[in-house]
Image (cartoon, rainbow, N blue to C red):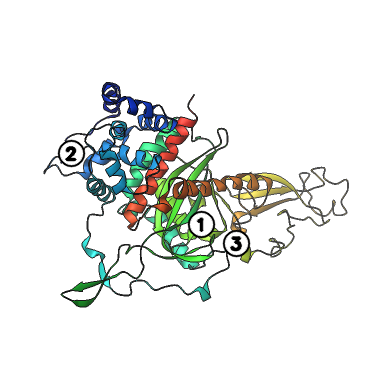
Amino acid sequence: MLIYFSSSQDYKEFLKTEKSSLSTSDLFRLSSPNFKSAIHKLSKLDVDLVADIIFPLYSPLGRPANDPAIYLRSVVLMLHLGFTSLKNWCYEVHHDRLLQYLIGSWNVPNHSSHYDFINRITHSFSHHNDLLPKGLFTNKSNSSKPKKGEKLMNFSNDDTYSLFDNYTHDGSVFDRDRMIYTLQLLFNAIAVIPSHDMGFIDSYNLVFSGDGSAFHIHASPFGHQIIKDDNILNTHRYSAKNADFGWDSDLGMYYFGYTLYNISYHNPLIHTDLPVFIDLEKASRHDALSSISSTARFLDINPELSPKFMCFDSASDSSAVYQFLRHHNIIPIIDFNQRKLGKNIYKHFDSISENGKPICDCGVEMYHCGYDYQRQRRKFRCPLKMGLIDSCPHADTCSPSPYGRTVYINDSLDMRLFGPVPYKTDKWKELYKNRTCTERINNRILNDYHLHQMRIREDSKAAFFSIFAAINIHLDAWIKNET
């Protein structure tokens, strides 16, 4: 039963009234840059925004629960100070009055209570199903591995089109029972929407990018034998039963864990990268599938942010991904899969140059006159009428109209090549540069906030700490660009 949820104003009052109780040495530590930035960051964290999300998680009956705002500030501070163990962090807090002051309570709950809060917010209370028969996972053979830097092609077009049909016809409503849905709502309310309201995420011509990263975990894929009364049972305990094997293209090796997938935004005016959606998938799940599901989930959670462009790398080069984005009026900026790409990507189309323009009968590229969004086609006009050439031997026979010959290229001819922003044009290249922000966000979450150094096994904890690392990234941006 939740009877008390301290507000941000309560926290500021606590900092003001209880500062006098700190010792001289604690006040000296508080003036150091690391602790000054910590108190500044926690003062910016507006827990009031998630009260409506937190309250329904508690029963109206039972023993009074601890203040959830304490857990929120505690985990944010833990990651800010670089701790990689929740148990060690809580031990440190219980013996450090300054940390208790920064969190906003002289009685911070222990690590078990923190884990209970994680289970509550990720809806993962059941622990009885970690006992399974031996052989849940099978090791991957290195003989079938791709080359270093290449993606593992473990999906088919039917898989992507199945996702496209599900999310197009049913929306994301059927998908709201996922484990971290509440956690994603919390992240959106406490970080993404405030960043948008403060102008860190522009509302005009939004360019979002998506990418996945290998999330290695510290768990055995082979489980541990259960021994009862000196007899070995044919049962194993798996500490990460929802993990599996995936391919890490950066290291060129198979790994055991998850895929951390993020959708991010790059603000070129203030040179800031911000995550807007965090998802956690199985390690074996291909990015082409995650690009559809994660985009659909993000649009469902935050309909106020309507991207105009979405950038993905060549792993998402699938016709279903293009169709899904265009269905939502989003222009896809996706690199081609090099294994499908020849020297001339237009060689299969008659009378189209290597620049993607029709060639008229005199052998000259036609003049590009723009894109018709309503009819989804590009318009090209006669090079003679547009002044590109001085004369044409077919001027009298090509078209009787004074307007000159006109050619249209519809997107349906090849959506990957002939969209509103044609592949490899100057505008396409400029937009595609935004995609690197997702790689920087993945690096910040996994390395700067030390998730790879944490002894994480369960997917609920992996998702929880990933999203709280993303909350820290937003708080860092607010402090950095504060005027």
Q: Is residue 180 left or right of residue 146?
A: left
Question: Compared with residue 89, is residue 454 higher up or lower down, i.e. above or below?
Answer: below
Q: Which numbered dot is residue 2?
A: 2
Q: What amino acid type should be assigned to the residue bearing mark 2? A: Leu
- Residue drawn where x is 81% and y is 57% of the image: 361
Q: Position of residue 72 (x, y in %)?
A: 30, 39
Answer left or right for 324 relative to 66: right
Q: CA distance from mark 1 to mark 3?
A: 13 Å
Which dot, 1 or 3, sits closer to the camera? 3
Task: Give the image quarter of residue 15.
Answer: top left
Precedes in sequence: disc 1 or disc 3:
1
Say which quarter of the image contains residue 62: top left
Tell me which residue sits at (60%, 61%) in the image: 337
Give the image location of residue 323, x and y in percent.
51, 56
Q: Residue furthest front?
A: 25
On screen, residue 258 above or below 233: above
Which mark is nearer the camera, 3 or 2? 2
Question: Element type at marker 1?
Answer: helix
Secondary structure, mark 2, is: loop
The residue type indicated by label 1 comes to Val
Q: Secondary structure at mark 3?
A: loop
| C-alpha gap between disc 1 and disc 2 | 43 Å
Residue linked to disc 3: 337
Residue assigned mark 1: 321
Q: Which circle's residue, 3 or 2, is located before the other in the chain?
A: 2
Residue 330 at least partly seen: no
Q: Residues within 10 Å of mark 2 (few under 14, many from 20)?
A: some
Residues marked 3 and 2 touching at CB (< 8 Å): no
Which callout, 1 or 2, points to the residue nearer the camera? Answer: 2
